[in-house]
């Protein structure tokens, strides 16, 4: 009789919601066909469009990994659980984004959609790392832990992340959890909307929960040899492999080793570092890492190298395609008896060289303050040089563009650079890239402000072997970074018809924005477009343009957009509002990059506040200290 009542209850409940399917443990319910198939235990509740599921599955040990590759059409693993109060909860997506396996989980814009892992056995006092990949255009992704797979059971905050990602690629999320008591824990992932970006879907994949291993040992630098002089860029760094390490953080100092700056995380034992200052001694070391745990006290293994300025042809600085190199004629001496295209007396000059595998080559020299570059290119050998081309910057510009063709492949060419204004030495930047082949003809590239976004458009007349376009942005017209990649519209990368492209920069910089296209062909070779300029709008609030890396270990980069020159207080508090750290920062009108030392903070979630002086609104954001 009890079984009959239970069946009637389930049938009546299912009838309230049309066309809903859910698999719970070994029960399958389908309102569209009005049947159910009992196999083993489990329960289900249906109310309107809200679904909650509970299963009878035993807990597992770490490591726990879920990429949803074995998920059934009825959403996901039967030992996992979802809870959604608004009917737009987690489900399997038919496609992901680059960097994710297929299928990932996806949740529609919703306030309160939870996905829970199955139960995992954890031991009190042990440190566990939670790693996953996620992607979204807004909302906040909360990760919590607790003893029950319900929203009320999630009593421990692990990490909260802004799901906004302007680049169409999965982001890496991670957190640390140390249980106070031993037992079975569940981890919950919640899409919380709305936030400052509005409602948004979130994708989730590749969840890995494991016990954090002990720190790896430090390693020893191999190249450059300690104390050596370097005349080529980028500087090739190499170190010994650490078997326990899964990645390495490269740390560099240009102030005698007094402080070090994080450069990049690499997954090999080599790295090409572009030393930005010539005639400078650099110190460097690497920090081996494993599952987010870094080796400690590795700065004691630092070694040094010195960059030279290339004062003579015989000591020329070798550069390669695709790089950006900073140079100076400060402390340089004049070269005598060398052909010159613009006599200016005996100017202080420096020398570079390149070896090209192509018949054509292009590069640009951009002068610094009061530096109008004169650039001569020679073939032959030092002491017996023949000038093949010379370019000078025009009257109203500070750059000289060099395009070379009919080059001898594999030959060495020499470049002499000096200031066309003989009164003083100065600094400059070389941007080098191959100019052949040119698979794409870009006839138009423009940008305009439309409301709160910047709209970029460009047109191609022909495309050959084209893969697509990397759109790059800069605040100063010199230092560019990627904000997106747009695939070619040409079939198989080839077209002789006019093709139109567009891209919306939905989060432009507060002040001026400079854009350029890096066209990439299928062979990996690339060329750059001209620069498009979009004038910024006047700020009326103090805001954070970026906070990274987040989570942070030692240093936190904070980009603050200011409406005026100002002196502000940058304050870090815990979630209870207690002030942990305060520092005074002088800002200029526009975007300002501030480096904050958070190495001494305990692991956890913190608020960071920018409190302006007079006449503007304050800015508040959140970050995680690992």
Image (cartoon, rainbow, N blue to C red):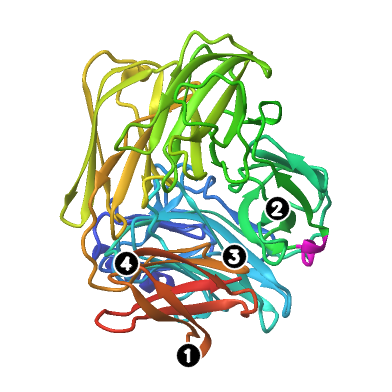
Report x, y in % for residue 221: 81, 49
* Residue nearest the observer in this picture, 1 or 367: 367
Q: Are marks 2 and 4 in contact (CB under 8 Å)?
A: no
Report x, y in % for residue 146: 56, 78
Mark 3 or mark 4, which has the lower sequence index?
3
Using the numbered discs, state the Cα–Cα distance from disc 4 to disc 1 in whole angstroms: 32 Å
Q: Is residue 49 magenta?
A: no
Image height of 80 relative to 351, above or below:
below
From the image, tell me which residue sits under label 2.
282
**Closer to the camera: disc 3 or disc 4?**
4
- Magenta-drawn segment: 295-300
**Closer to the camera: disc 4 or disc 1?**
4
* Residue nearest the observer in this picture, 123 or 32: 123
Task: State the residue at coordinates (64%, 74%).
Answer: 599
Which disc is residue 122 wearing? none
From the image, tell me which residue sits under label 1.
576
From the image, tell me which residue sits under label 4.
589
Using the numbered discs, state the Cα–Cα distance from disc 2 to disc 4 in whole angstroms: 32 Å
Image height of 546 relative to 105, above or below:
below
Taking the image as drawn, is residue 306 in sight? yes
* Residue nearest the observer in this picture, 533 or 381: 381
């Amino acid at each position: 009789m009890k079984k009959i009542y239970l069946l009637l209850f389930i049938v009546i409940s299912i009838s309230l919601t049309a066309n809903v399917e859910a698999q719970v443990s070994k029960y399958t319910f389908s309102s569209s066909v009005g049947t159910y198939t009992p196999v083993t235990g489990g329960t289900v509740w249906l109310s309107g469009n809200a679904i909650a599921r509970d299963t009878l599955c035993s807990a597992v040990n770490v490591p726990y990994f879920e990429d949803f590759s074995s998920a059934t059409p009825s959403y996901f693993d039967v030992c996992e659980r979802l809870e959604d109060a608004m009917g737009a909860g987690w489900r399997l997506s038919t496609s992901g984004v680059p960097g994710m396996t297929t299928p990932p989980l996806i949740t529609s814009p919703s306030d309160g959609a939870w996905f829970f892992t199955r139960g995992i056995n954890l031991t009190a006092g042990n440190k566990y790392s939670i790693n996953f990949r996620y992607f979204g255009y807004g909302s906040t992704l909360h990760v919590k832990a607790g003893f029950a797979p319900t929203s009320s059971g999630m009593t421990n905050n692990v990490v909260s992340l802004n799901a906004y990602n302007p680049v169409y690629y999965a982001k890496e999320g991670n957190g640390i959890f140390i249980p106070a008591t031993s037992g079975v824990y569940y981890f919950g992932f919640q899409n919380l909307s709305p936030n400052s970006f509005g409602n948004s879907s979130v994708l989730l994949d590749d969840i890995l929960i494991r016990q954090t291993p002990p720190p790896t040992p430090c390693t020893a630098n191999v190249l450059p040899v300690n104390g050596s002089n370097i005349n080529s860029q980028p500087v090739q760094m190499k170190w010994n492999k650490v078997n326990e390490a899964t990645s390495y953080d490269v740390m560099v100092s240009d102030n005698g080793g007094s402080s070090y700056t994080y450069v990049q995380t690499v997954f090999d034992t080599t790295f090409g570092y572009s030393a930005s200052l010539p005639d400078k001694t650099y110190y460097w070391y690497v920090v081996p890492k494993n599952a987010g745990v870094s080796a400690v006290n590795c700065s004691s293994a630092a070694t040094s190298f010195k960059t030279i300025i290339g004062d003579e042809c015989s000591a020329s600085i070798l550069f390669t395609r695709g790089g950006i190199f900073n140079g100076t004629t400060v402390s340089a001496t004049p070269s005598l008896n060398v052909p010159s295209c613009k006599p200016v007396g005996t100017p202080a000059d420096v020398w570079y060289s390149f070896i090209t595998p192509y018949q054509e080559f292009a590069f640009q020299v951009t002068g610094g303050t009061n530096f109008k570059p004169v650039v001569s290119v020679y073939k032959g050998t030092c002491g017996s040089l023949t000038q093949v081309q010379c370019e000078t910057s025009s009257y109203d510009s500070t750059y000289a563009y060099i395009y070379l063709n009919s080059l001898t492949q594999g030959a060495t060419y020499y470049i002499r650079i000096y200031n066309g204004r003989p009164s003083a030495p100065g600094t400059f930047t070389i941007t080098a890239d191959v100019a052949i082949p040119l698979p794409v003809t870009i006839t138009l590239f423009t940008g305009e402000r439309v409301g709160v976004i910047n709209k970029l458009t460009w047109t191609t007349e022909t495309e050959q072997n084209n893969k697509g376009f990397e759109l790059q942005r800069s605040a100063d017209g010199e230092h560019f970074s990627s904000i997106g990649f747009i695939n070619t519209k040409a079939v198989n990368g080839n077209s002789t018809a006019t093709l139109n492209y567009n891209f919306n920069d939905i989060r432009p910089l507060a002040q001026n924005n400079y854009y350029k296209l890096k066209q990439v062909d299928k062979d990996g070779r690339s060329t750059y477009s001209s620069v498009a300029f979009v004038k910024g709008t006047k700020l009326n609030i103090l805001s954070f343009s970026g906070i990274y890396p987040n989570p942070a270990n030692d240093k936190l980069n904070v980009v603050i957009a200011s409406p005026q020159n100002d002196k502000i207080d940058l304050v870090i508090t815990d979630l209870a509002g207690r002030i942990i750290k305060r520092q005074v920062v002088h800002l200029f009108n526009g975007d300002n990059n501030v480096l904050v030392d958070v190495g001494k903070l305990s692991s956890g979630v913190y608020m960071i506040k920018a409190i302006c002086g007079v006449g503007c609104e304050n800015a508040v954001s959140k970050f995680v200290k690992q």
